[in-house]
Image (spheres, rainbow, N blue to C red):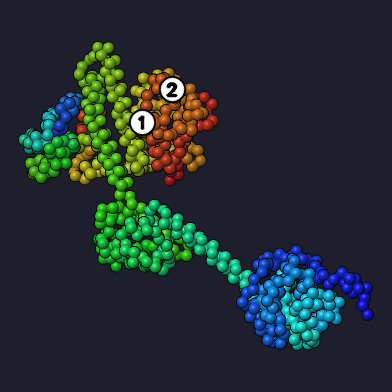
Amino acid sequence: MDRILYIDDEADLREIATISLELDPGFEVRTAASGSDGLEAARQWQPALILLDVMMPGMDGPATLAALAANPETSAIPVVFITAKTHPRHVGDLKALGARAVLAKPFDPMTLAGTVRGLLRR
Amino acid sequence: MPTAQDHAQQVEGPIRPPIPADEADRLRALDHYRLGGVGREPPFDHVTQFASELFDAPISLVSIVGSDTQCFRGACGLDAADTPRSVAFCAFAILQSDVMVVSDATRDPRFRDNPLVTGEPHIRFYAGAPLRVANGQPVGTLCIIDSKPREFGERERLRLARLARTVVDLIELRVERFAADEHRRTLGAERQLLTLTVENVSGGVAVVDGDLRLMLWNQAFVDLFGYSPELVAGGGDACDLIRLTAERGELGPGDPDRIVAGFVESIRSTASGRLEVQRRDGRILDIRRESLRGGRFIMTARDVTQERQISRLKDELVSTVSHELRTPLTAISGALGLIAGGAAGELPEKARQLVAIGAKNAERLIQLVNDLLDMDKLQSGKLLFHFGDHELGPLLDEAIEQIEPFAHRFGVRVLLRQPGEPVVARVDPRRLCQVVTNLLSNACKFAPDSEVRVTLERQGPVARIRVADEGPGISPEFRARLFNRFEQEDGAHQLGHTGTGLGLAISKSIIDAHGGSIALDPDARAGTTFLVELPLIPPA
């Protein structure tokens, strides 16, 4: 089973993303409601990939990514941003931070799992 | 012995001077040389003074013979300004090719009854050399007059004729001076108009000559850069101005002298330039340079601080609004999509229909947000294109596949016809798909339960994609507005056709960015046919 950690402050989206990702029977999904919760979950659970929302209160996506990268226990885990801000400037900035990819919201719930599976293989 | 004519003159008064055959041309010459009217001029006075002394004559005149009077432009020994032409000796003299000499007027039948002979100034002797201007017309004479009869030898005639040529030279110079004065006045007026115009332009304007000195500038230019009046007074050195701006650090980091040298090099080597300068006080200036003739150039400066702020705010607003809209839309469409996709198990028929309605409308909202964002990016030139050489056939297949579920809903069958050999063009595949699916979705909405034909063909140097439907067509009134933003044909909504009115505007912008064209096929006999043309990549 591949562990996927989804970090987003929106409870509805956490739920939908979980159901969407679990359409792939090879995925085990956990979620976190904040950047700091996500850091802790990543350190303890060691997921294969982290899906990370960008705009969150407190520790936002970029800050969370920086903290993940700074910690040797989590620095190797690939991170994929998932954001509603799809302005090319934003996307470019996010990729420059070291994200493996940037996915746009709204995502297609029926194909999200397939997309993530593809990113895992890269 | 007196002749019969003399007798008649004795009875009827002095003989009137004949009028030259080409008098009209002669009068035109007077106009051209501006010799009409009264008034003496010092250069002509000086000549008559000299003639008086040279020939020892009490009176000398530069006489201009007008239509009714002769006027004295220069005079020595006579106070009168003019006399009637009818009594003018000079009116006879202008008819001569050479100097006219009257040794004793009392013995000359033409003049003996002339009031200027019988009365003041009691003319006895007259010698007049015609003043022939450049076109040969005699405008008047240089003459000398004496109250005593006298002889005038050949040598004296020659001298008078020579002096007359000097007067003609003066007349020619005088008219050239008039032209020069007029030119100067016109230039002065034009410069005044230019200065006034430049001063009233809202932005800063400066014209710099080939030696990089300020020729013309307005107060706005000085104010925008914050230059002191002394620096520009009397046409400052443009290099000094650039150096000062560089020293303030407003032209980026680096040695001011090298920055100045870089600017001079750029001015010398390029016809135009554009630069944004951030002043120390935070203001942003948009500076443009355009070369003029003769090594000169014009610089314009505009304060774009507010424009930049508004643009940034708008970017932020669009970004924030789109985020705030997309988050709930993600949840709605995600939830509905999962249910419709069967992730939550089988649904009763009624529930399935309702979920489909919800999903369809969530899709519409997402499309609206996407269209608005695309339009915003296209307008601000921020939409990124990923161009590559692609075969168009497979791209059209892909677009048709994407639209298939939508077309199915409207009972539309999409047919593709393409040539056997590959048609390759330089395109952004995702954006081209967006255009084709947009055209296809329009066709589905307006021509339900029919066939929509997509044709790919080569047409000379272009690839032509034709999307033809069998719908009601587009009204002539709407055709002109078809590609405008937020335009939808009247009644489209009543017919249940939904859309943002942005699809075709976006499609046009995308095709424009490809260097292609999109238009209605004017030859289509029924329905609506869109033609998209893209430059072909020639086969290797």
Query: Which quarter shows the C terminus of chain A?
Result: top left
Question: Which of these two is toward me, B98 or B41?
Answer: B41
Q: Which amino acid does label 2 sit on?
A: Gly
Considering every residue shown, the one lying at the far front of the view is: B119
* Cα distance between the residues tagged 2 and 1: 32 Å
Q: What residue type is labelled 1?
A: Glu
- Residue drawn at x 80%, y 85% is B149
SS for dot 2: loop
Local crowd size for mark 2, using a 10 Å CA cut-off: few (<14), some (14–19), many (≥20): few
Left or right: B245 in relation to A48: right
Give the x, y percent position of residue B443: 42, 25
Sequence-first disc among 2 and 1: 1
Give the x, y percent position of residue B194: 47, 58
Q: Which quarter of the figure has residue B212?
A: bottom left
Left or right: B477 in relation to B160: left
Local crowd size for mark 1, using a 10 Å CA cut-off: few (<14), some (14–19), many (≥20): some
Q: Which chain carries label 2?
A: B
Give the x, y percent position of residue B55: 72, 86
Q: Is residue B272 above or below residue B340?
A: below
Q: In this view, does B492 lie above or below B275?
A: above
Query: Which quarter shows the N terminus of chain A?
Result: top left
Return the residue at label 1. Answer: B398
- Residue drawn at x 15%, y 32% is A8
Q: Which quarter of the figure has residue B244?
A: bottom left
SS for dot 1: helix
Give the x, y percent position of residue B145: 74, 81
Return the residue at label 2. Answer: B491
